[in-house]
Image (cartoon, rainbow, N blue to C red):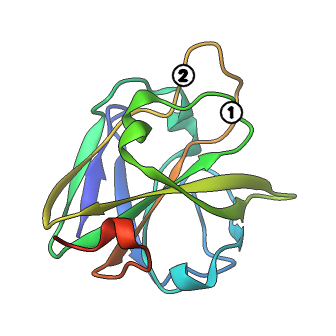
Amino acid sequence: MCCLALQSGLVAQFEYGLSVGRTAYSDREYTYRSLPADLEGAAYLVTRNDDKFVEGNNIGSFEVLVPSVVYVGYDDRYVNRPSWLDDYIDTDQQLVVGNPGFTMRLFARWVDAGPVILGGNYVAGEGNYAMYVVIVQPEQCAWDWCAPS
């Protein structure tokens, strides 16, 4: 995994070793304040929080080299979610980003090796909250729905 070019022209970068205290966005000093234990050490995408207003079902992609679970942490303050997240399953897990902190609900999808397309964060009529976060766990999944067939 390497990087992701978003519509904003920003190159988002993958970091490795997700843990509490790591930076969530390249344009804010927001850090991960809590996260599920099974995501400790995962790869994660560092984007700009200012990309929260980008719309569309395909704003960029990245490639996973092995089957993986892709998690999207979506700000829980939003009432509606973008339609591209319909392909992801609600894990009933959450993480907290920022200071004092806002909750993000985790959605997940099992993907085979290859490209992963991400959509925009913004849904018309919603508030000014946070850009989603992306976490990738190669070849690890604890749920029946993501076991390879």
Q: Of marks 2 and 1, which one's residue comes earlier in the chain?
A: 1
| Quarter of the image that includes the N terminus | bottom left
Q: Amino acid at mark 1?
A: Tyr
Which residue is the extreme one toward the top?
Answer: 125
Above or below, comparing residue 129 to residue 13 in the picture: above
State the CA–CA distance, disc 2 to disc 1: 9 Å
Q: Residue at x 27, y 81 (%)?
A: 139
Instruction: Give whichever of 76, 51 is nearer the camera.
Output: 76
Crowding at label 1, few (<14), some or many (≥20) Cα neighbours within 10 Å?
some
Which residue is the extreme one toward the right?
Answer: 100
Crowding at label 2, few (<14), some or many (≥20) Cα neighbours within 10 Å?
some
Query: In which quarter of the view is residue 145 placed?
Result: bottom left
Which mark identifies residue 78?
Answer: 1
| Quarter of the image that includes the C terminus | bottom left
Q: Position of residue 84 (x, y in %)?
A: 37, 34
Marker count (numbered): 2
Above or below, comparing residue 114 to residue 123 in the picture: below
Q: Position of residue 138 (x, y in %)?
A: 30, 79
The residue that mark 2 highlights is 123
Which mark identifies residue 14?
Answer: none
SS for callout 1: loop
Horizontal arrangement in the rendering, residue 58 relative to residue 137 (left or right) = left
Q: Amino acid at mark 2?
A: Val
Query: In which quarter of the view is residue 24 placed?
Result: bottom right
Horizontal arrangement in the rendering, residue 84 relative to residue 75 (left or right) = left
Q: CB of mark 2 within 8 Å of CB of mark 1?
A: yes
Q: Residue at x 67, y 62 (%)?
A: 94
Horizontal arrangement in the rendering, residue 114 relative to residue 148 (left or right) = left
SS for callout 2: loop
Q: Position of residue 44 (x, y in %)?
A: 44, 68
Q: Residue at x 36, y 43 (%)?
A: 10
Q: Position of residue 123 (x, y in %)?
A: 54, 22
